[in-house]
């Protein structure tokens, strides 16, 4: 961070010089116009009148597949470039690219929304992302991810209740869609952190919301993961131990799962609505879920997978409680009947008289 001394020009005008390196980077010349934008935190943003051309902003990134120890490592690098908001990146190989690496590139490209292969040779594959972040809303993506995750939560245990392995497979297949939405949302978050004008266009008017949205998105992605794992365990149960499952066990697990599902659903709504009392009640609800889980564990039959399913349900509820906590913090940013900023003695006195 560079510092500048404020200088007085004339009788009332204050001036500050700008870094010459920045002026050269954006091709700013004497006589050009710049704009000043006041931010909510009291700072001032300096904007050039001539924005950079898209061609100047688009940089190409190179990845050497030769240095990737295995195909999965290459896949993670591609996902990382995508999340970082990079639009063009090239995978290179000093020899003919191995078929396993090519298969991984093609597979992960189908899972990253807006990403496609624009050039392919035996030694080189070029990927390009065509997403316009200004056309998307982060709150819409968060709600979409919550719907997908909670559908997996519901279907995984519904498959157990109805002895329907195909329903459990549907839940497993939905997890891939949850990953796609999560990666896209994280790409938007990082882009918004770098470019304030884009942040406002996708619905991030408060810098704190970048942190809040990031945490909630991760909680929802983990909820989908736990629910997918539950669905896999249910398939094993139905295949090998269905005749040993009693109705009361299935009903107990189903009721517990419904509580966890509702906790997550209401926690997401609390984040947007900002109801502190409801969010606090959901945190207390988590304790009830944990007690019920412990009771069920004491009475469960000795059948593989049952205890793990109960622990997965508890973890889902725990992440829902984490979202509720974020909802409380988000609500406290604005004035509420429960908590507000003390501004004058008269307001405090008025509150004392109401009591």
Image (tube, rainbow, N blue to C red):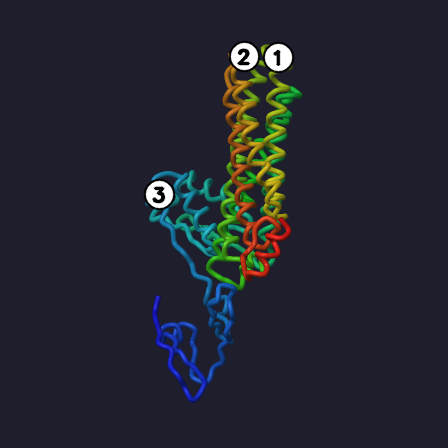
Front one among 46 and 175: 46
Estimate how packed mark 3 is, as few (under 14), some (14 to 19) or many (20 or more) residues with alpha carbons within 10 Å: some
Identify whether 67 is placed above or below 241.
Answer: below
Residue beneath disc 2: 301
Estimate how packed mark 2 is, as few (under 14), some (14 to 19) or many (20 or more) residues with alpha carbons within 10 Å: some
Identify whether 136 is placed above or below 52.
Answer: above
Ranked by sequence position, the earlier of labels 1 and 2 is: 1
Front one among 296 and 74: 296
- Residue 110, visible in the rendered structure: no
**Residue occupying the point 44% across, 43% down:** 102
Residue beneath disc 1: 246
Disc 3, disc 2: CB below 8 Å? no
Q: Is residue 276 left or right of residue 191?
A: right
Q: Provide residue 120's location: percent of width, then percent of height.
A: 46, 51
State how far apart marks 3 and 2 are (Cα): 46 Å
Q: Within the image, what quadrant is residue 289 found in?
A: top right
SS category of the residue bearing label 1? loop
Disc 1, disc 2: CB below 8 Å? yes
Q: Within the image, what quadrant is residue 143 found in?
A: top right
């Amino acid at each position: 961070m560079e510092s500048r001394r404020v200088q007085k020009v004339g009788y009332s005008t204050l001036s500050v010089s700008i870094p010459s390196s920045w002026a050269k980077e954006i091709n700013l010349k004497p006589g050009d116009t710049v704009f000043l934008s006041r931010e909510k935190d009291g700072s001032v943003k300096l904007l050039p009148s001539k924005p950079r051309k898209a061609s100047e902003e688009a940089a190409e990134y190179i990845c050497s597949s030769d240095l990737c120890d295995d195909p999965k490592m290459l896949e993670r690098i591609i996902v990382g470039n995508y999340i970082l908001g990079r639009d063009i990146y090239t995978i290179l190989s000093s020899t003919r690219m191995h078929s396993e690496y090519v298969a991984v590139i093609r597979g992960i490209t189908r899972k990253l929304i807006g990403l496609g292969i624009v050039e392919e040779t035996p030694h080189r594959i070029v990927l390009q992302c065509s997403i316009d972040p200004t056309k998307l809303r982060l709150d819409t993506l968060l709600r979409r991810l919550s719907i997908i995750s909670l559908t997996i939560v519901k279907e995984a245990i519904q498959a157990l209740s109805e002895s329907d392995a195909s329903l459990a497979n549907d839940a497993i297949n939905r997890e891939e869609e949850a990953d796609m939405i999560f990666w896209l949302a994280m790409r938007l978050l990082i882009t918004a952190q770098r470019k304030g004008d884009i942040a406002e266009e996708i619905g991030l008017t408060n810098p704190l919301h970048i942190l809040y949205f990031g945490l909630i998105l991760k909680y929802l992605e983990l909820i989908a993961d736990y629910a997918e794992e539950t669905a896999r365990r249910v398939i094993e149960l139905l295949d090998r131990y269905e005749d040993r499952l009693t109705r009361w066990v299935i009903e107990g697990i189903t009721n517990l799962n419904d509580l966890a599902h509702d906790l997550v659903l209401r926690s997401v709504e609390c984040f947007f609505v900002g109801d502190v009392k409801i969010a606090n009640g959901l945190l207390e609800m988590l304790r009830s879920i944990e007690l019920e889980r412990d009771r069920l564990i004491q009475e469960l039959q000795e059948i593989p997978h049952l205890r793990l399913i109960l622990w997965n349900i508890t973890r889902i509820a725990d992440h829902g409680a984490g979202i509720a906590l974020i909802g409380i913090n988000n609500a406290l940013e604005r004035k509420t009947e429960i908590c507000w900023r003390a501004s004058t003695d008269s307001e405090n006195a008025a509150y004392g008289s109401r009591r």
